[in-house]
Amino acid sequence: MGIVYGMNRLSTTEESVLGVAAQRLEQLQAAIETVIHGKSEAVRLAVVALIAGGHLLVEDVPGVGKTTLAQALARSLDLSFQRIQFTSDLLPSDLIGLSVYNERSSEFEFKRGPVFAHVVLADEINRTTPKTQSALLEAMAEGHVTVEGVTYPLPRPFIVVATQNPIEHHGTYPLPESQLDRFMLRVRIGYPEPEVERRILRERTQSDPLASLRPVMNGEEVLELQRVVAQVRVDDALVDYLLRIVEATRRSEMLDLGVSPRGTLALFRAAQALALTEHRSYCLPDDIKRLVMPVFAHRLVVNSRFSSSMRRSEEAEAVLREIIKTVAVPV
């Protein structure tokens, strides 16, 4: 006998809340897609990261719209936004702020850095030193920063959208595993289809679509969506399926580093968020399979014995695809 997902009937109130949430998410996706054309999956995953309370890493070659996606997400929300261009001379204090002496009060005052925004764009994050990269660890994991023994909470909701180019290595500092593990999802945008690129050419000759993008959602609505996401049901069979994939990454002889408990929780939350974006109050096996690659691949480290001519990220994806084939899907 097959598993029946979401078999418990929703109350009228739950159905109403779900309907409103799904409608708001449709509006958000549609707003972003007025700027990012032909990349519905990348936009959907960006929305998933937002409502799941995670952070997003956009990794691709230059010029395909990494920064534009982050800016479109920020402009679609009535929230504070800061863009930080990461460079080799950027200091931790340039991110989180520093204490400045006030001669009038004869006291040191803390001047907040750009990380104190709801949406933070970390552009080309791998171009700054590990010391500066690590300044984001506490903010991304715990939602606050500590300076000189004093803890300052960050605004809620809070999301870091980071971009990086995986091809060019000159003057870059690869993100350590601890930093990569803080990103709930890693997405790629890819080159547009010819017809989509034709549309982009026509639009950009007249005006910048970002300039006309208006907010469709405020901070309280985002927080409410995050609360609704937590209500999405995940059947025990799906939890077992997820855990079997995780355990396979930890036991694989092809991997030096498998998926962490943080990664397991990230996939669980992302699956709930994906279900909500598709007007469901319950998860399906396809939600797990669809998200395994963007949630897990950047967390894996391939054993050097199995390295090939592929880039590190591609090697991890190849191993993960083989693992997925060996784990039975609940039916």
Image (cartoon, grey):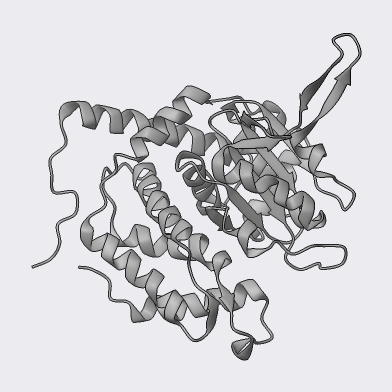
Quadrant in the picture for the C terminus: bottom left
Q: Farthest residue toward the top?
A: 104
Residue displayed at 45% across by 54% down: 266
Q: Position of residue 99 (x, y in %)?
A: 81, 28
Q: Is residue 176 visible?
A: yes
Q: Is residue 307 left or right of residue 84?
A: left
Q: Is residue 34 visible?
A: no
Residue under the image location 52 percent in, 53 percent down: 184
Residue 59 sits in quarter:
bottom right
Could you tell me residue 325's position as x and y percent? 37, 79
Q: Which residue is at 52% across, 85% downward?
A: 254
- Percent position of residue 274, x then y: 39, 48
Please state which of residues 249 and 150 is positioned toward the viewer in this rendering. Answer: 150
Residue at x-position 15% and y-position 31%: 11
Residue 261: x and y in percent read 44, 60
Q: Nearer the viewer, residue 216 or 59?
A: 59
Tell me if residue 27 comes above or below residue 280 in the rendering. Answer: above
Q: Residue furthest bottom?
A: 305
Q: Is residue 35 left or right of residue 106?
A: left
